[in-house]
Amino acid sequence: MSITAVTKGRPLVAVLITVLISVLISPAAFAGDSINPPVRKIEIAGNEKVATDEILQAITNTKLGMPVDEDLVKKDLQAIADLGYFSDVRANFRQYQDGVKIIFEVVENPVVKGIEIKGNSALPADKLRELIPVKDGEILNVNTLNKGLQSMLEDAFKEYGIPARITDVQVKNSGIIEVQLAETRVNQIIIEGNEKTRDYVIRREIRLKPGDVLNMVELHKDLRNVLNLGFFDDVSREFRETSDPDVVDLVIKVKERRTGTASLGAAISSTDGLLGYIEVAEDNLFGKGQRANIKLEFGKDKTLYRLGFFEPYINEKTSGGFNIYNERSTEYDAENRSFVKSESGLDATLGRELGEDLKGYLKLRVYDTAEDYPETERIDEQGKTRSLTFSVIKDTRDFFLRPSKGSRQELSVEVAPSWLGSEYQFNRYIADYSKYFTVNSKGHVLALHGRVGHIQPTGGEGISDTELFRVGGPDTVRGYEYSEAFTGQSILVLNAEYRFKIADKLDGVIFYDTGNAWKADEKISLSDLHTGIGVGVRIDTPVGIMRIDYGVGEGSGKTYFSLGQTF
């Protein structure tokens, strides 16, 4: 008669080795019709690598002196098989003294000579092999291999983000184990939810292509890039099964937000009097991802126009844009005598992707400034500034409108040399760093920011007042008026904000700011820093993040209304 048992394994891998368990001689042959003979001796045969004592410890049901019981023998055979070392387990009975001797005969698995992983194209085979705790030169343990293969898939997914499954495992007599993998691949990419934004605007942010191996780490980066276009309130993904278990359709779902504003009206300014204005801005022009804006202000003492355009995708890695502006206003000196101040010019920027989350920019600025004093003998002032700015930005923020993790780092150098035709000649150096931490399960965020800078005259007419650093106001140190800003050629600003959710699309902020700007003849000292503290709210509106802050500095408190995060 024979008794069959099955090795225990995870669903991941089918039974690697069929274990044949059989009783070669029926114990009833040694006794009468109904009484089984007693067990007088238990022996182990066939083992070379596995210790006899280890096998004997698995035999817990069959007892010396007790009658032979077929069911108990079967349980012991299964227990031996469950050790994982054997491809064949049998129980042989021999007459012995006044009873029987049971010989548990085993056939050991081969010694492992190597593990070959096949079918993988994105997952590195050498790294996968390191994740399997089966050593070459040791007898194969099926349990260890099964658990190791399961652990390998889990660890590989955590490290590389690539889902895969094992389709076949073969153990050769030579000791070579062949593991066949099937990596999940993408069949098609489907975009849903976009009514205005063109599909290609979203697709060009997704490096994953149909036919590629699905990489969840890279996909999450792609989805972050889509979200950071600023056109959507939400970006999510789902997978749909196909007829092939190793191929899925990737569905990217977006929820669009308003990206354009238009306003027409009038305002009264304490400095400029009655003003009329027209302003139109669109961050997703015609759904093509382009940015355009135009602003006109007109009044008795001020006229202003600004026109801008930005193309994010001149080609696969290059972006570019420009701004043209002209501003003319009547102002008054300390003796209340009027003069006309004007500034006009343009800037043009080219951006280039340098690596993952890393971009470089080249910016040309061309502008003229003038001050005309018709009522006094004061000499009119005018000058030309021509500069090039080189900057590098590393941005790993999860969502630039409301970042909760990641960082933004920027280094820039601006030069205004004589060979560009600049009358104001200088070099400007700036380093800017922001870091974001999610501090609890409620999504509270600690945001930290620092900026240092220095501008150095290199000749010509030196540095105009408009080029000096300014500290004080809604974007540097709150609690001070921008018109009362501390100015200088060197700057240090440090900011900390604790951001927390109050309601949907409404966040609260507690902030601490400190900083100063020093003139060329002033000694830079941390004891000279000016500090502001306060609270604020951030409202996610269709036109962007509206920021309202109340800060207290060294004098009375100040209230600020602005758009966008402080940093």
Image: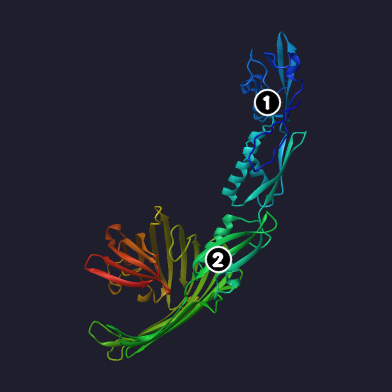
> In the image, what residue type sits under mark 2?
Lys
Which residue ends up furthest to the front in the rendered image?
33
Quick check: 486 above or below 341? Answer: above
Tell me where residue 334 appears, x and y as whole percent.
24, 82
Tell me where residue 335 appears, x and y as whole percent.
22, 84
Q: Nearer the viewer, residue 439 or 9?
A: 9
Tell me where residue 526 appears, x and y as whole percent.
30, 58
Label 2 Cα neighbours within 10 Å, binned few <14 / some 14-19 / many ≥20: some
Quick check: 281 above or below 205? Answer: below
> In the image, what residue type sits under mark 1?
Lys
Tell me where residue 322 appears, x and y as whole percent.
50, 78
- The residues bearing labels 1 and 2 have C-alpha atoms spaced at a distance of 56 Å
The residue located at (73%, 16%) in the rendering is: 33
Marked residue nearer the N-terminal end (1 or 2) = 1
The residue located at (23%, 85%) in the rendering is: 336
Residue 253 — which label? Answer: 2
Q: Secondary structure at mark 2?
A: strand
Front label number (1 vs 2): 1
